[in-house]
Image (cartoon, rainbow, N blue to C red):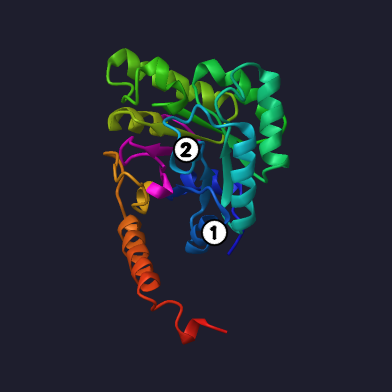
Amino acid sequence: MKKITVTDIMKMKAEGKKIPVLTAYNFQMARILDNAGIPLLLVGDSAGMVEAGYDTTLPVTMDEMVYHTRAVARGRVSAFLVSDLPFSSYQVSITDAMKNACRLIKEGGAEAVKLEGGARVADTVKAITSMDIPVMGHIGLTPQSVHRMGGYKVQGRTKTGAESLIEDAHAIEEAGAFSIVLEGMPANVAREITESLSIPTIGIGAGPDCDGQVLVVNDMLGLLADGRVPRFVKRYADLKNIITLATGEFIKDVEEGRFPSKDHTY
């Protein structure tokens, strides 16, 4: 399969092709998703919650993001690879942001970075893109702002809030981003943003009119340990139940002496 690049992702919007995006955090999952034909893989800082068990994405470190990104980079062959800049890696200074973006590219093997925020991070986006590193923006419900927002709440419900999101989207585009994630906002606001931008929008909890859609792979596959599924998630499989049943069979086979059998013995 042809290697997908940033120009291919941008071209998909121009051609009216929807962009499917999934997260990945390790080699095996990246290889499976890549072989299945996913065009864009995101190493999200959501790894902290679904892989490490953190309550929020805030504790995730640069070293953790580099580790997960490097693993995914080894697993993917064709998909374009974007990696999240975690909390505190770009907020303190533009210099920090530039250095940490370079780490995800140089050490992690990412082909682009993603960061949260609107107009307030436009200068940071511009600085990173000035180094020829593609940047994906992220506005709306931004998980790294969970404390300011008072929880994971839909943004842009009011006229003022919607106008602010639209301004943020344009600021990120003007700063040089190649695409932007729209998370947790009314569908009509996401539609207006999508129609007004020349760069692709990737929705998550933002309705059907975005240029693409992203889901956390653990949500999509039904792998969450506690079984909670956000409203915007469509669960395409129930791997939690499959794994639970398989584990139960393994336990019984070992306890009752059925495993290993002659077929599994040298």
Whole-angstrom CA distance, mark 1 to mark 2, is: 18 Å
Region in magenta: 196-218
Q: Does residue 154 belong to the magenta stretch?
A: no
Q: Which residue lies furthest to the top in this view?
A: 160
Which secondary structure, mark 2?
Answer: loop
Question: Which residue is under mark 2?
Answer: 46
Q: In this view, does 262 lie above or below 47?
A: below
Question: Which residue is under mark 1?
Answer: 28
Q: Nearer the viewer, residue 198 or 156?
A: 156
At label 1, which amino acid type do we have?
Gln
Earlier along the polypeptide chain: callout 1 or callout 2?
Answer: 1
Residue visible at 65% across and 16% down? 93
Could one spot residue 124 in this view of the protein? yes
Which of the 4 image quarters holds residue 135? top right
Q: Does residue 210 belong to the magenta stretch?
A: yes
Which secondary structure, mark 1?
Answer: helix
Residue 13 x, y percent position in the rendering? 47, 44
Which quarter of the image is occupied by the C terminus? bottom right
